[in-house]
Image (spheres, helix red, strand yellow):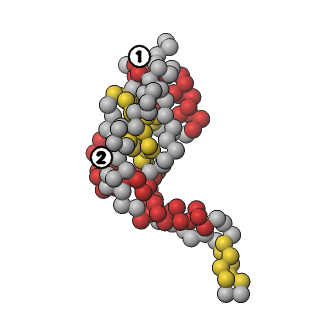
Amino acid sequence: MNQTVAEVMTSNPITVTRETSLTEAIKIIAEKRISGLPVVDDQGKLVGVISESDLMWKQTGIDPPPYVMFLDSVIYLENPARYEKEVHKVLGQTVGEVMTTKAISIAPESSVKDAARLMHDKHVRRLPVVNEVGQVVGIITRGDIVRSMAGL
């Protein structure tokens, strides 16, 4: 069986925008029992994803980077820019402030085998499916792939 992503994906998936409140995104993820959502712009083009992992920052908080004091100066032992990004995620109120911007996606004409390999290699649970102009037309999940393997 050489199925394409288009044959097993969920068409017209639920999406959010950068401006969507985190509260609303969390509610959608919890109520629909999904692990993440594609984030799109006004033209429906993929700009990122928001996943359970992104939302975990709200609960886990942050640890400041290790530092040493020397002559009344703070010397960071790790990049403080990383810390600033974590602070931004913890304090964020909108999807755009906490989403992952480097979204991995796949084309509808790709094979299910390619989708499975990509998910495995990149350690993701879902792949937004985008058309030739970058618009989200579907989503394929690990569950979709397993169901296709079972012939369901």
- Residue type at numbered disc 1: Gly
Q: Few, some or many C-alpha atoms within 10 Å of disc 2 (few <14, some 14-19, many ≥20)?
A: some
Question: Alpha-carbon distance for marks 1 and 2?
Answer: 29 Å
Of the numbered discs 1 and 2, the one sitting upstream in the chain is 2
Decide if residue 54 is in sight here. Answer: yes
Q: Residue furthest right?
A: 70
Task: Give the vertical position of 56 relative to 135 (above or below).
Answer: below
Q: Residue 6, relative to residue 32: is it above or below?
A: above
Secondary structure of residue under mark 1: loop
Please name the residue shown 66% across and 66% down the image.
78
What residue sits 45% from the left and 27% below the top? Answer: 132
Label drawn at residue 12: none
Do the residues under discs 1 and 2 have CB atoms within 8 angstroms?
A: no
**Residue 73 picture location, percent across and down:** 67, 83
Residue 129, by quadrant, is: top left
Residue that badge 2 annotates: 28
Quick one: label 1, few (<14), some, or many (20+) residues within 10 Å? Answer: few
Q: Quadrant of the C terminus?
A: top left
Type of residue at label 2? Ile
Q: Residue at 38% of width from left, 30% of height from top?
A: 138
Pinpoint residue 33: horizontal percent, then vertical percent: 33, 42
72 sits left or right of 18 in the view: right
Q: Where is mark 1, residue-wise?
A: 151
Expressed as whole percent of the image width and height from the top left, the position of residue 24 reads: 29, 52
Looking at the picture, how far across and down is residue 23, in whole percent? 30, 56
